[in-house]
Amino acid sequence: MTKPYRFPDHQVAGDADTTVFLLHGAYGSKDYFRHEIETLVKAGLRVVAWDAPGYGISPLPPDGLSIERMAETAGCLIDRVGSRTNIVLGHSMGGVMAPAVCAARPDKVHAVVISATVASFSQKSEEDKKNFLAERIEPLRQGKSFRDTAGAVIDSMFAPGSQGPMVELVREVALSTSSETFCAAIQAIVDYDGMANLKALKVPLLLLAGAHDKVGRPEGMKNIQSSFVPHADYACLPASGHYAFAEEHALFNQHLLDFIRGRVTARA
């Protein structure tokens, strides 16, 4: 059995029989979900948002990070604060992790939502992996500050013209990430082969892509549906990059709530 990390710091909001667990990406923490939490609670759902190990006020484990151990830790969170129906919504790194959380707790996860991510980095070429790491980690290893290094990368992840308080919140929270944690997380993502867990998904799955996303490219997310999980629902948000929950907040949540009401709570 995979050993979990320290029990994660988290926020619980709302009171309902259906809980949405929000798993953030490699840049950021639960704090960039502030508006998402408010919208889901007002829609009648309960929400749990965590700080993954090393993020926010959760300490970085001394032996680094792995997707498998983070998924088991998220499973422990579901054990403790889950409800009758539990939905795991993973964004970016959280989306890589979400199928592993379902595999870790198959009797307690009733649906999965994957936002803006890849099926598995095991499917990428060695050259793609090398470039992904070099762009994000090499400048930090050369002594440059995270804020100086990450700013341009984060800005490039939004769609042209994306702006407003939700976008600014994501940007500022993302820039607050610890460089040590970030390096550990990016290495964990590249090292993880998640295809088996993705192909094994039997619960309802929603895939949400941004048309301008250069990381969780829409064609790659669509391929998850066509090649690996044919029962999945898929939606592409036309004016979004990597952070559709902030860039097209209303449309993102229209797709999300329609999925929850139509395929999850009705089924439960």
Image (cartoon, rainbow, N blue to C red):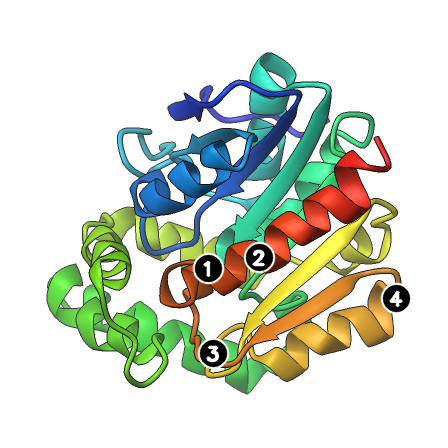
Mark 2: which amino acid?
Answer: Gln
Q: CA distance from mark 2 to mark 1?
A: 6 Å
* Front label number (3 vs 2): 2
Chain-order first, disc 4 or disc 1 = 4
- Contact between labelled residues 1 and 3, with CB atoms less than 8 Å apart: no
Tell me the quarter of the image containing the N terminus: top right
Which residue is identified by label 4?
Answer: 230
Which residue is identified by label 1?
Answer: 250
Is disc 4 surrounded by few (<14), some (14 to 19) or many (20+) residues within 10 Å?
few
Up/down of 249 relative to 237, above or below? above
Q: Quadrant of residue 8?
A: top left
* Front label number (3 vs 1): 1
Mark 1: which amino acid?
Answer: Ala
Q: CA distance from mark 4 to mark 2?
A: 22 Å
Q: Residue sitting at 53 percent across and 37 percent down?
A: 43
* Front label number (4 vs 2): 2
- Contact between labelled residues 1 and 4, with CB atoms less than 8 Å apart: no
Mark 3: which amino acid?
Answer: Asp
Q: Is residue 244 visible?
A: yes
Q: Is residue 203 left or right of residue 176?
A: right
Q: CA distance from mark 4 to mark 1?
A: 26 Å
Tell me the tag on residue 213.
3
